[in-house]
Amino acid sequence: MGIEIRNVSKNFGHFQALSDVSLDIEAGELVALLGPSGCGKTTLLRIIAGLETPDQGSILFNGQDTTDVHVRERHVGFVFQHYALFRHMTVFENVAFGLRVKPRGQRPSEKQIKEKVHSLLNLVQLDWLADRFPSQLSGGQRQRIALARALAVEPRVLLLDEPFGALDAKVRKELRRWLRRLHDDLHVTSIFVTHDQEEALEVADRVVLMNAGKVEQIGSPQQVWDHPASPFVYGFLGDVNLFHARAHEGEVLIEGLRLDSPENSGAQNAKAFAYVRPHDFKVERYSPGAQGINAQLSRAIVIGPIARLELIPSEPYQQPDNSIDDRLIEAQIPAQQYREMGLSEGDMLVLTPRKARVFIDAGEGI
């Protein structure tokens, strides 16, 4: 089931939740709508489901306009963050519910329902819990039952709204892997909403980055990570350090350092923003005359194979508006390197960016 979203806009009073959003989702694809709270991702999901109506634009399923088709006729499965299981029903009855409420002419026989439900419970590896009630299940188990219930009606499209948001980190990670394997088996067109960057990058075939009701970038997880289209995307996908810089003819000047920036070869002394990820710093002990950003180690967090360093620049960084930026710089090095360097809090270090992603200030010409 391919889905076409065409020029969709939606307002709630004076708040514009979506602004002229267009997106194509291929049949059998698993797509993540990723962005901060209030960016419009859940509103878009609800419009695809038929739970909300767009003010403008249209939704097409396999080329057929479904914008005004009732939610019951869209053949969409929906999984919510908080499970929405019927507490008074057993696991079996929860999964069977969608089959039992079908119109009489479409309703399977009791034997077919029983076979279907047990097949789905086996699929989500929870057939042994068929006679239990939701209150007797763990959070992860409840969410898998909610997914089995959504699949029972054989939806053409599966929509998941923050499906693992209410679960602890370990269970979330297990369910992410499980959902990816399940999708690879079923190939049902699926769209899931999340604000968790790691979740989107790990699970989805493609990621749709949203911000303030608009689509910022669409691409594979590797594409959006390696080639962020805007400062928002770069800043949203993981930790990042922001420096004010100048770009000139393929080079960028950051804190007195010159780095290659071939994508900005046409820039002429333009004000720019340079983003450096924590793991893209070379970290050395300070020595007189060393080229780099001098900073004092304020705190080190060593967990497993990674040492996360929080550093205070030796010279307070002055913003273009003459205010002082006292923000920390974050760097990451292997824990083994941290131990070999014998670092301790208070040490002076020199940071050298190995690479930076540079964006010209929107107010500057090229």
Image: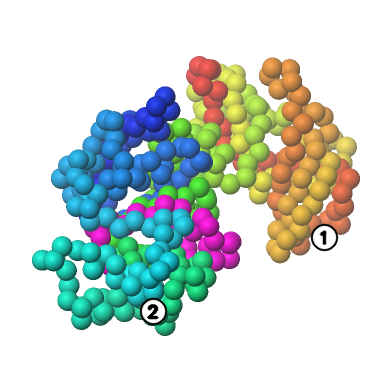
- Quadrant of residue 100 within the rendered picture: bottom left
Q: Amino acid at mark 1?
A: Glu
Residue appearing at x 70%, y 58% in the figure: 306
Residue 352 in the figure: left or right of residue 180: right
Q: Which residue is mark 2?
A: 130
Residue 303 in the figure: left or right of residue 99: right
**Secondary structure beneath label 1:** helix
Q: Quadrant of the N terminus?
A: bottom left
Q: Position of residue 275 (x, y in %)?
A: 61, 36
Considering every residue shown, the one lying at the far front of the view is 88
Query: From this viewpoint, is residue 248 visible?
Result: no
The crowding category of the residue bearing disc 1, from other C-alpha atoms within 10 Å (few below 14, some 14 to 19, many at least 20), is few
Q: Amino acid at mark 2?
A: Ala
**Secondary structure beneath label 2:** loop
Q: Specify the segment rendered in magenta.
A: 152-176
| Depicted 5 relative to depicted 362: above or below | below
| Depicted 116 relative to depicted 47: above or below | below
Q: Which numbered dot is residue 146? A: none
The verdict on residue 355 being magenta is no
Q: Which residue is mark 1?
A: 340
Earlier sequence position, callout 1 versus callout 2: 2
Residue appearing at x 27%, y 51% in the figure: 26
**Separation of disc 1 and disc 2 at Cα?**
55 Å
Residue 355 in the figure: left or right of residue 336: left
